[in-house]
Structure formats: C-alpha cells, structure tokens
Image (spheres, rainbow, N blue to C red):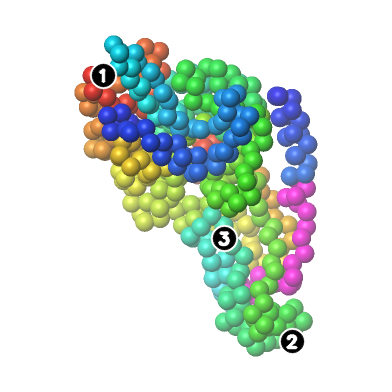
Amino acid sequence: MMSQTVGRIMLALPLFLQACSRPVSQPVAYNHKVHVAGEEMECKECHARVEIGFQATLPELSACEDCHLEAQGEGPEEAKVVQAVNDAEPIGWERVYAVPDHVFFSHRRHVKVGEIDCVECHGEVRDRTHPFTVATPPISMSRCINCHRAKNASTDCAACHR
Amino acid sequence: MVIDLDRCTACGACAVACAQENNAPFGSPTDSPETRVIRWMEVLRAAQDGNHNATVRMIPMPCQHCEHPPCTKVCPVYATYRNPEGLVPQIYYRCIGCRYCVNACPYTCKYFNWTEPEWPETSVRGLNPDVSIRHKGVTEKCNFCMHRLQRAKDDAAAEGRAIQDGDYRTACQQACPAKAITFGNLDDPSTQVARAAESPRTTHLLEDLGTEPKVYYLREGA
C-alpha cells in the first residue's frame, strides 16, 4: 500500500509539474503595461474577487466594457475585445495559476487580511507587455513556506492542506 | 466540544450533516458488513443490561482531539499531529496509508480508504469545495470542520476584529436539533463551551488512558 502511494505520487509528480508549466495561449494578446502603468488601473478592477474569495478570478467582460465599447486605437488585438464587448461574448481567458486540489489558497486571506501587495507573489506585472502563458513566477510550496517563515505566518500544515 | 448525552436523541442528524459537509462517500453494501463505511461522526450504540430492562445508550462519536493523541505518536510521516490550537489535523497528502494511527486510536475514530471514493452522478454537485477528496490508500478522520474555522477567522480578520464565540460552528453542531453539541474555545473561560465543560455531569470516554480527550460528554450520574 505504501509503495503504491509512493508510486502514485512519483507518477503524478511529472504530470503535475508539466501541468503547472505547460504554456497556454490567450485569446487576446493583453498588455498589462498599457493598463496598469499607463492607465493606472488597479489589479482588483479586473481581478474582481481578489479581496473577497479564494480566487482572484479572470476579468469579466464588464471590466472591458467601460473603455472598449469603441476602439481606442488601431490594434487588431483591441478589435477582438471591441467585437467581444459588442457581441456580449465573454473572452475565453485561460487560467495559468492553479494549485493542486489538496492545497487551499485564499486570495482574500493574503490580500485583504494579510495586506500583501500583489507584486510580492506575481512580480512586476505592470512591466509586462505580453499576456501570461505560464504561471510567472511558478508556484511552489517552498516559496510559500519561505514567505510564511519570513513573515511569521502560520506554518501549520492544516492552514493550507485539509 | 461538549456533547450532552441527556439532550441527545440519537437521531443521527449529526452523522448525516458531517458526511455531507466533509464529502464522505455513501459507502456500498459490500463496505458495510466489512465496517468500511466512513463516517467521521458516528452514533455508537452501547448496550447496558439491567434487570429485565436492557437499555441502549447512544453516543455520538467524533474524533476526540486528545491532548495527548496516541495517533500522532505513531505516525511515521507527520501526517497527523497536534497543532498549536490543540486540534489534531490529518494531512491526507502526507499520509502513506500505513494505518498505524488507525490501530493506535483507542476511540476507533480513524478510517482508512480501502477504495476510491465514489458518488452517484446526482450527488457530485453537492460536494463541498472547501474539503479535499480523500483518495484510496489514505487515512482520514474528523477535524472539527477546520475549513469552517479558517473561514470564520478570515471573516473576523477581514472585519478587523478577533474571532468570537459562536462565529464558528461545526456541521454536526449546526445540524443537531436537540442542541446537544456545543463547540468553541475551551481555553477561554467566557465561552459557552468552557462553561458547559465545567458541569458536574462531565465525563470523558476511556478516561483512564490519559489521552485527555477534548470532547466532553455530559450525562447524569457520570
């Protein structure tokens, strides 16, 4: 039984790592820099549930509606957004961040309760001109634990695994 | 946790609520005779023979979350341990399924998954996303609805206040129609549970083992 379990983990590990790092392609070549650095938008304007729920959530179409009912520029990528807004067709953003099902990560706990800036985990998103295709920087338990130790947060297993 | 046996009617609502809350599979007809149906909260029967009037005492049995848990002493991989709050969590992903803890638990509150959990298709939508699915080959047990505790802590912290008595109720406590189950912080003398635990009717199960269970049973003549 023990060897079975260990074997399963060994088998699942490369798959899991691969799943974490397999690049996805986004429907629109979204430019964070234009929005965050240029328009000075806050993360939570598009990732609406970041202070409320477990997931920060991908942008709803309503987040694009305010500015992109009509085209602001000439770009073909923006034209896709304008089209989507006018057709009320949600843009199928692909998730790049996913924790395995035995991990419980709450954005609310970190952002609202812990008052941690998004940059600390997600890096300088404001400088990105290309959309996310892989989790950047990659998520790993050692990263979580190092930060928890540094900030004196709980390192009780049950805080994240239950 | 305090369970008042004088109030308990043995209706089993706690067991049902717990199974639903914590994604317990229903168990198959072949599991039952093999005692492999997993119920973290179980209403145990204890028959007592009297003179021509045998009585059956029903005892709701969650994990006792002992102060000196025998299960944690034998776990070779730190999959179960006593955490700083005094709860005894079980970390499924660390568990290697050796079943030492299942044998060590004097209260038989630990359950081993002999098969992959299965649900009818209609029930899958009712699974609780806050609780992991336990796969074949790991041991599981009641954890006093720890996911609810974390949610209550987050709610309190988001509102900028400390967690209060009553913010957090376990599923069995919430479901009990007789209000036989009280739950809270035993270390804080002002809580309802700490006051109930001081009752002269208090008893523990298998007290002489020295495990110091944190589930207090109340019954007349204890």
Please provide percent x and percent y for residue A36. Answer: 60, 71
Same chain letter for marks 3 and 1: no
Three-letter code, disc 3: Ala
Q: Nearer the viewer, residue B49 or B103?
A: B49
Real-space CA distance between mark 3 and mark 1, rounded to the nearest whole angstrom: 52 Å
Element at label 3: loop
Please provide percent x and percent y for residue B24. Answer: 55, 39
Q: Quadrant of the C terminus of chain A?
A: top right
| Mark carried by residue A56 | 3
Three-letter code, disc 1: Ala
Q: Which residue is label 2 attached to?
A: A74
Q: Could you tell whether B67 is left or right of A101 in the image?
A: left
Span of residues in magenta: A17-38
Residue A28 seen in the current view? yes
Q: Could you tell whether A28 is left or right of B87 in the image?
A: right
Q: Quadrant of the N terminus of chain A?
A: top right
Closer to the eye: label 2 or 1 = 1
Q: Which residue is label 1 attached to?
A: B222
Q: Could you tell whether A105 is left or right of B198 in the image?
A: right
Badge 2 vs badge 3, beta-carbon distance below 8 Å: no
For the view shown, which residue lies furthest in the front direction?
A: B52
Q: Nearer the viewer, residue B143 or B22?
A: B22
Residue B42 vertical placement versus A92 (above, below): above
Q: Residue at x 77, y 64 (%)?
A: A25
Three-letter code, disc 2: Glu
* Residue A160 located within the stretch drawn in magenta: no
Q: Mark 1: give few (<14), some (14-19) or many (20+) Cα within 10 Å.
A: few
Please provide percent x and percent y for residue B110. Answer: 53, 26
Q: Residue at x 61, y 77 (%)?
A: A64
Residue A36 vertical placement versus A140 (above, below): below
